[in-house]
Image: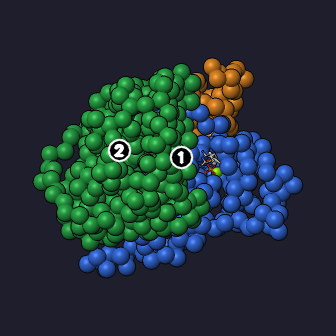
Chain colours: A blue, B green, C orange
Amino acid sequence: MELINKWPEYHKKDVVSHYCPGCGHGIVHRIVAELLEEMDLGKEAYLVCPAGCAVLAYLYLDFDIIESAHGRGTAIATGAKRANPNLFVISYQGDGDLSAIGTAETIHSANRGENISVIFINNAVYGMTGGQMAPTSLIGQSTMTSPAGRNPEVDGYPLHITDVVAQFPGVVYAERVSVSSPAGVKKTKKAIRTAFETQQEGLGYSIVEVLSPCPTNWKMDPVTACKWVDTDMAKEYKPGLLTDKREEKRKEKG
Amino acid sequence: MSGNHCIAEAAIRAGCKCYFGYPITPQNELGEYMAANMRKNGGVFLQSESETAAINMVIGAASTGARVMTSSSSPGVSLKQEGLSFLAGFEFPAVIVNMMRGGPGLGNIAPAQGDYFQSTRGGGHGDYRTPVLAPASVQELADLTVKAFELADKYRTPILLLGDGMMGQMKEPVVFPEPITDLPAKPWALKGRGDGPSRYQASLILDGLAMERHNWKLVRKYKEMAEQETLFELYKMDDADFAVVAYGTTARIAKGAINRARKEGLKVGLVRPITLFPFPDKVLQKVAQQVKNFLVFEMSTGQMVEDVRLALENERVVIDFHGRPGGIIPTPIEFSRVIHRYYRRM
Amino acid sequence: MSKKDKVFTVKVRRDFCKGCGLCIEFCKKEVLAASPKLNRMGYNPAEAVNSKACIGCMMCTQICPDLAIEVYSE
Ligand SMILES: Cc1ncc(C[n+]2csc(CCOP(=O)(O)OP(=O)(O)O)c2C)c(N)n1
Ligand code: SF4
Ligand code: SF4
Ligand code: SF4
Ligand SMILES: [Mg+2]
């Protein structure tokens, strides 16, 4: 008997994560660990984990990790990558982290075309603090701070930050994916692989937005949460490639 | 060379590899000098989108073991406080320069000393302190910049270099140290796990007892610094019966005033704290055996005076205060009159 | 040996499973079901009730957020 899905080297073994049942964070962690092994990047990997549900990612992932203040991930990533370009730098952030409190850092690290890879977990809610409205929450979505549903007149509209930064010349690769089905998981892995390759090649900024279920704060069972990603969330945030300037950048670099 | 340029040059010689900053008067020349010179030597200069971003870039660079600096002035340093708290908690070495200006709010761009509390009390949230060096001459700006990097590495802590707008613009001759090439090893730095075990730098410490242990560990470090690293200057104190206490720019002004007063027969001296945290309270206590009248002089409404009172709480002494906040620079003549007034009352 | 001829065995690491049910939902061969017995964490973990039907498509391991499923081939 041979084990097909071998344990990923850069994922700690025999730890049970604090994530709720059916939470997308665990899937993305596994993908990151698998890719670092497959791409032989684990030894120089440096991941910034956010204030958010993924704050304890270092308990599960087995390579060098630093925790960030809420929203400052890409500033820390910038500092680390600039100080030591040999590091393979990943900023892992939630939607509150990346598109609310960290908006300035997000926009400007992207605009500078920092050679880092950003993994953006969009679960349309502030997970860690108990399910408050995020900039990404859908119109009508009921959260702890929009109990009657998000009302654009007072709460504004869902923020499409990945679409915004995808317009920047420094953003070489941007894609939106989801981890709400096995097929989505495969696409997510492919997208994160491309993001990692972009950094490996030294081409510049890459970002993958992952639509990710938060069953707990959506008050749904995990299966329904996955369906809600595919129906409601994917309608607002259409999965797909947002930009791929790798060819251009390669030419620029000669 | 101007004070701001001097800090920048000294930092480069101290092996500073990365500088991150955001423009703000009156310290722009520092960043500009870094822009002109850092990249030449393979270093990093980056103008960030905000002081918040700059201090977090500092965190990132420091985490990899590089010597790193950021500089700003009062409003910008307020924005850096979150990062300072994280640096202290992470125990990352870094040098943060604050060339103070008048405040609160935008205040003005004239020299002031209103950030003493913010600097010495921690400034950001949580149970920590930031060691603070307060130079008073261009030569000292250079020397203390180098010292700041050394202390930061030695104690694994952010160090504040606290000057003011006047010091940044001041031009004086300066002798720089030879560039430092052999920097201390930093086995704790995140450099990728390589073939070893993975490492992490966590800021969240959910376990109360572990958090408490961490807090006390920081305190032990500060205590050790208080014993080993406290710096001060005594000026004309040998025969003094009256002591002025001042740091930085006000200490320079005080020296002029003291010289005038001395000519008029007043036995006045100066105690100048160079480290504001740790504060030289033992020195003040020793001075209090000889001098019973202290006059604290600051370009603020009275901040360091509280540390003087704390240091001398068990001494039978009189502590007076003279302050000019708001970016007003008092003259030596003005201050010598103040000395006369309090001296006569003695 | 082609995939078709292979025999697969599915194992759920009982005490690492949080009973989210996603593997059960996405296994088209109905190999997996929720165990009536609670595990150490108090969840009803998934278990392989029909391992023989497994075709090694790895949908379950892809979607499992907790690395709780092992698929073996012979
Ligand atoms: C400066 C600051 N403000 C607020 C918080 C509280 N806080 C921690 S995580 C978080 C939101 C996290 O939401 P998100 O980034 O979407 O991540 P998720 O938990 O959903 O994965 C907030 C508001 C904080 N840690 N720091
Ligand atoms: S609250 Fe949501 S995002 Fe956080 S662990 Fe639970 S399911 Fe995941
Ligand atoms: S490998 Fe495929 S068939 Fe086998 S249990 Fe998993 S999902 Fe079902
Ligand atoms: S997907 Fe994983 S955690 Fe969820 S029920 Fe299946 S084995 Fe358990
Ligand atoms: Mg979120």
Give the number of the mark in front: 1 or 2.
2
Residue at x 23%, y 50% (from the top left corner): B143
Q: Residue furthest right?
A: A148
Spatial CA distance of label 1 from label 2 is 25 Å
Q: Residue B277, percent across and down?
A: 41, 38
Residue closest to the eye, A128 or B10: B10
Q: Which residue is mark 1?
A: B302
- Residue type pointed to by label 1: Gly
**In the image, is B339 to the left or to the right of B140?**
right
Q: Alpha-carbon neighbours of circle 2 within 10 Å: few (<14), some, or many (≥20)?
A: some
Residue closest to the eye, A92 or A30: A92
* Chain hosting mark 2: B
Q: Quarter containing ligand 4? A: top right
Q: Residue furthest left?
A: B178
Q: Residue A133, percent across and down?
A: 74, 54
Q: Alpha-carbon neighbours of circle 1 within 10 Å: few (<14), some, or many (≥20)?
A: some
Residue closest to the eye, A83 or C9: A83
Q: Which residue is mark 2?
A: B266
Residue at x 39%, y 38% (from the top left corner): B242
Q: Is residue A217 above or below residue B5?
A: above
Residue at x 47%, y 66% (from the top left corner): B110
Residue C63 visible in this rendered orientation of the protein: no
The reply to whether label 1 and label 2 mark residues of one chain is yes
Report if the CB atoms under discs 1 and 2 are less than 8 Å apart: no
